[in-house]
Amino acid sequence: MIQHKVIVGLEIHVQLCTESKMFCGCAMEFGVQANSRVCPVCLGMPGVLPVMNKKAFEYSVLAGLVLNCEIPSFTKWDRKSYYYPDLPKNYQISQYDLPLAKNGFIEIPVAGGRGEAVGTKRIRIIRAHLEEDAGKNVHTAGNYSQVDLNRTGTPLLEIVTEPDMSSGAEARALAVELQRIVRYLGVSEGDMQKGHMRFEPNINLAITRDGREYRTPIVEVKNLNSFRALERSIDYEAGRQLDEFLETGRVMEMGSKTTRGWDDVREATVLQREKEEAHDYRYFPEPDLVPVELNEAWLDEIQGRLCELPLARQMRYVERFQLSEYDAGVLTGERATADFFEAAVVAGGDAKRVCNLLTQVGLKLANERNCDVRDLGFTPQMVAELANMIAAGTVSATAGNTILEEMVRRVHVSDMVLVGDSVKAEIIAKELNLIQKSDAGELEKIVEQVLAENAQAVADVVGGGKKSGKARGFLLGQVMQKTKGQANPKVVSEILDKKLC
């Protein structure tokens, strides 16, 4: 009998959102003309000297702190030598034996059978170090390649985990959580379409056969830039390695590590080359940069920028506001959304109704306008007022969504200038005739009329059985139809219960 366990470690490259590059003053801009954001320093011209970007270092320390890492007071720079066409110096300034953060961990949500988070799993962090990125090879010009060096020198934070994950789903959960963290901290935009985050999983199997354990050779899958590709490449590679072991019996040995690429069309990994070891890079201390000494005052200043992390905030929303795991996860996906939600609740808004308005309408409108919810024009107080109108039954939840959309439309039509009462929820509800009828006396007459016109449905409800629920829903629908959707369903339901008992 054969059993196997998937073993996954992850290397994550995070582009930091500084204004300039890591060791020179060139601007960090995406989508500009090729080779237009370069200088003698990032091009590696003779005689130039790099200067460290202080903000990039501070951002990296901040990330190390939230990853529960040890932050040494002394770190240095190293040269990592290798040749690629997009690496103009033929070496990369990185960190080798003295990284700026080490020995940490990150908590990731662990899903239950129905996809609901039931707890967390701790993934250990080996190290996090700062380095510069290479340029970009472009293969779209014809039968030759081009090199764009605009990205050369971009500050990258590389985070390396222990092989504590056992599936593509767990690796994906870590990647999603890390993206939320760096966005919350403001150290990276985390936009994978722009290459701000790239993942490189290391995968192998522990296979038990006849009481003996075997380890397959480690495979590193390079430069994945989506959560989907990360998860699927790991799951594919696990299956491929198991098949290879059953066919050849090949096991891990010195020098057997390889790198593979991911073919998104075929959904398969493709062999690239044997993996280099540390000695192949000929590391040595960078002679043009002094070591960095982090004193207590500087570290305290960086620690002062820490905030509540998204997973902790998500769990707090579930416990305090009784939100579902899904809704809490959506709200905490971006810090601006979570901040807006809490501000609306502080303003007196019903938490669940505020959540529904933001997740069902606010985020959709923000996505359409390529902004976040705080830029839509409504305030937390306005959303709180609307949420309470829904909670009180003044308007229905559907009408509430319509009112929020109209609120945004009016604000934008008026060039983001709030035009007095015209954008208030109550005014909009009256103008659009969305106020629910809750007068029990008036609704009782309509209910009696519906019951008189639908004797068979009444008989089905009173008789019980399979038809009862459907018949009751039909009667409620008839009342709503006669009131043109303005009847308060809760009041109508109470009247039906009294009349049909």
Image (spheres, grey):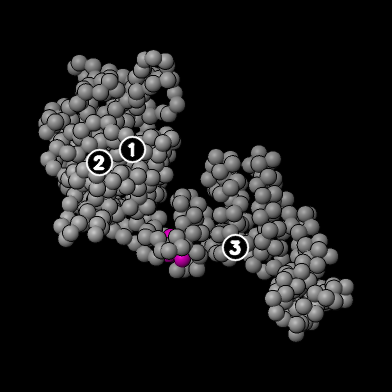
Q: Which residue in the protein does label 3 denote?
A: 353
Q: Is residue 271 left or right of residue 367?
A: left
Residues tagged 1 and 2 counted as in contact (Cβ below 8 A): yes
Which residues make up the magenta segment? 314-318
Left or right? Give the position of 353 relative to 276: right
Amino acid on which the number 2 mark rests in the picture: Val
Q: Crowding at label 1, few (<14), some or many (≥20) Cα neighbours within 10 Å?
A: many
User: Which picture quadrant has residue 417?
Assistant: top right
Which percent across, then down, holds residue 307? 37, 54
Between 237 and 374, which is closer to the camera in this rendering? 237
| 41 versus 154 height, above or below | above
Q: Quadrant of the C terminus?
A: bottom right
Measured from the top left, where is residue 60 in percent x and y? 28, 43
Specify the quadrant of the image occupied by residue 49: top left
Give the answer, above or below, for where 191 lies relative to 467.
Answer: above
Question: Where is mark 2, residue-wise?
Answer: 219
Please tell me whether mark 2 sits on a helix, a strand or a loop: strand
Tell me which residue sits at (44%, 23%) in the image.
32
Badge 3: few (under 14), some or many (20 or more) residues near its Cα, within 10 Å? Answer: many
CA–CA distance in space, label 3 to label 2: 48 Å
Q: From the image, tell me which residue sits under label 1.
A: 269
Q: Nearer the viewer, residue 306 or 357?
A: 357
146 vs 387: above or below: above
